[in-house]
Amino acid sequence: MRVHVQGGKRYNSAVNSTVPTKPGSVDKHERRRSIYAAEATGLLVMAILLLLLIVIRYWRDIPWSAR
């Protein structure tokens, strides 16, 4: 539904439209940092888990008294 004013102009033609805000570069960098931090945390967790499984598996075969 269009509302017309005298002269054939649209109702909101004189009103400036708002400019959509672009995401700031700060938000983009913070998002990247959190992704990298999560990736590093995941890699550390996997490495610790792998080391723990290896030690559990070969516990009896490790020569603990060797110097």
Image (tube, grey):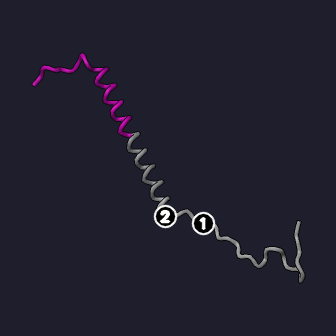
Q: Bin the neighbour count of mark 1 within 10 Å (Cα to Cα): few under 14, some 14-19, many 20 and up.
A: few
Number of callouts in the render? Answer: 2
What residue is shown at x 26% (from left), y 19% (from top)?
59
Q: Closer to the camera, 64 or 6?
A: 6
- Marks 2 and 1, how far apart in space? 12 Å
Q: Bin the neighbour count of mark 2 within 10 Å (Cα to Cα): few under 14, some 14-19, many 20 and up.
A: few
> Which quarter of the rendering shows the N terminus?
bottom right
What residue is shown at x 32% (from left), y 27% (from top)?
52
- Mark number displayed over residue 21: 1
Is residue 53 one of those drawn in magenta? yes
**The furthest residue to the bottom:** 7
- Mark number displayed over residue 4: none
Q: Main secondary structure of the magenta part?
A: helix
Is residue 39 one of those drawn in magenta? no
Vertical comparison of 53 with 26: above or below = above
What residue is shown at x 79% (from left), y 74% (from top)?
12
Which three-letter amino acid code belongs to the residue tagged 1?
A: Thr
- Mark number displayed over residue 25: 2
Q: Closer to the camera, 64 or 29?
A: 29
* Location of residue 4 (image quadrant): bottom right
Which residues are the magenta region? 43-67
Q: Closer to the camera, 65 or 11?
A: 11
Vertical comparison of 11 with 36: above or below = below
Which three-letter amino acid code belongs to the residue tagged 2?
A: Ser
Residue 28 percent location from the top left of the image = 49, 59
